[in-house]
Image (tube, rainbow, N blue to C red):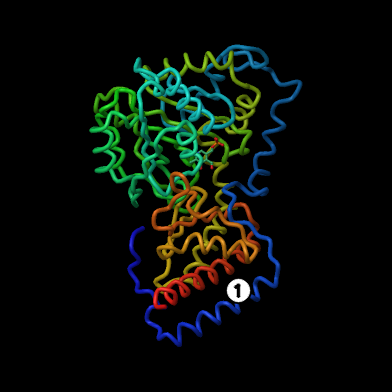
Amino acid sequence: MTELATPNVYEALSDEELRARVTALEAEAADIRARRLSLDMARGKPSAEQTALSRPMLDLVSSTTPLEDGGAVVDNYGTPDGLPSARRLAAQILGVSPDNVVVAGSSSLNLMHDLVCRAFTNGVAGQKPFWQQGEVKWLCPSPGYDRHFRVTEDLGITNVAIPLRADGPDMDTVQELVEDDPAVKGIWCVPKYANPTGITYSDEVVRRFAALRPAAPDFRVYWDNAYAVHAFGDTDDRLLNIFDELAQKGAGSLVYEFGSTAKVTFPSSGIAFVAADDHDMAEIRAAFAVERVSAEKFSQLAHARFLKDLDGVRAHMAKHAAVVRPRFELVERKLSEGLGGLGVAEWSHPHGGYFVSFEGRPGSARRTVALMAELGVKLTPAGATWPSGKDPRDTNIRIAPTYPTLDDLAAALDVFVVAVKLVAARLVLEARA
Ligand SMILES: Cc1ncc(COP(=O)(O)O)c(C=O)c1O
């Protein structure tokens, strides 16, 4: 989303009309403040209704369950790559061979963190560890997922914000930086239903990723396919399989792909997985072998028994969609009724994932989030979707509609509409002063 196509209605008002409008909006805000609301639109997590969908999984492993899986033992060390049935399930979700997947732990972010740390301390593909290579840079398509950015920032890596467009990262910028600068060692990608904009990378963008010829042999694409199966509408966006594209081009090692069932079954108690080509997989296995003998397997067994295969996952996700869809429809309705045609805001219209990305006038996001807090509604901090929390135009706000009840969400969105209008009108008034 770039410049707004519609003119700002507040700019068309005379000074007197504008002052009257600000006064009226301030009165609306005062009424809301008096209601002492306590609402939250910040949490990108499933509602209790959604997590309840997976409770039956908890009954599938008990003291009488055979603790054996395709020849692997569940209740003892062994099978460090994960149980065969869990690897098959993860491989189907990611569209790769089970041989190229490791299932380990419950958090994909944890696996990403492990691999960046490993690159930092031990190096990738026989190259020197990052700590011995001087400045290391990481590309951060923005707005993006704040926790990705924190992983690299925490290690002293220089995060470089690059534009994220409707069809994916700006590939001219990516290509130039990756192919010309050997200090660029990685890029964070959420290729389907991106957090927060909800966009899915186009075929052209995926192909351009697969065609990259990095200046650094230890550059890797961190392809975080967290929302691979998270459509909530009638359309499911199609994402090209990046490993198929790499294979067609005969390319070398380039991509680590991640996923988890955090938002399929239980956040923090799902199963997490990573896929890569044979060479990278051997390196990842060796790295993980230092960290643990083998990962937790009861949860893997429960997941494989509960979800079974990709069809099982899709059937389960249809139940999530039935809960989630009305919330996204409500966001769309409230924002278009309240803000449509005013020329002060744009927002995304995702087919899946967990967020709506909101773009206000330049210089408005921090003020809107602060005003919302005063009015009793918590939002994700403004700027959080950019490296170091610095949104250069101060326009982006992440809306997370899944967790609140529909009634709370409706109330929070009504407040949001007033806050956005008041900040936009004040900005015009201040610019004239
Ligand atoms: C893009 C993305 N990746 C990863 C995660 C976290 O996944 P996990 O719970 O498997 O660490 C999230 C959670 O919001 C996310 O939005």
- The quarter of the image holding the C terminus is bottom left
* SS class, disc 1: helix
The answer to whether residue 204 is seen in the rendering is no
For residue 156, side relative to residue 178 (left or right):
right
- Closer to us: 292 or 301: 292
Q: Residue 392, position in %: x, y?
A: 39, 54
Q: Residue 85, position in %: x, y?
A: 55, 23
Q: Going 24% across and 28% down the picture, which residue do you hit?
A: 249
Q: In this view, does 396 lie above or below 300?
A: below
Q: Going 49% across and 49% down the picture, which residue do you hit?
A: 384
Q: Does the residue labelled 1 lie within 8 Å of ligand 1?
A: no
Q: Is residue 135 above or below residue 49?
A: above
Would you identify the image quadrant in which residue 216 lies? top left
Q: Residue 255, position in %: x, y?
A: 36, 28
Q: Going 55% across and 78% down the picture, which residue do you hit?
A: 25
The answer to whether residue 260 is seen in the rendering is yes
Give the amino acid type for the residue marked by disc 1 in the picture: Ala
Q: Going 60% across and 64% down the picture, which residue do you hit?
A: 412
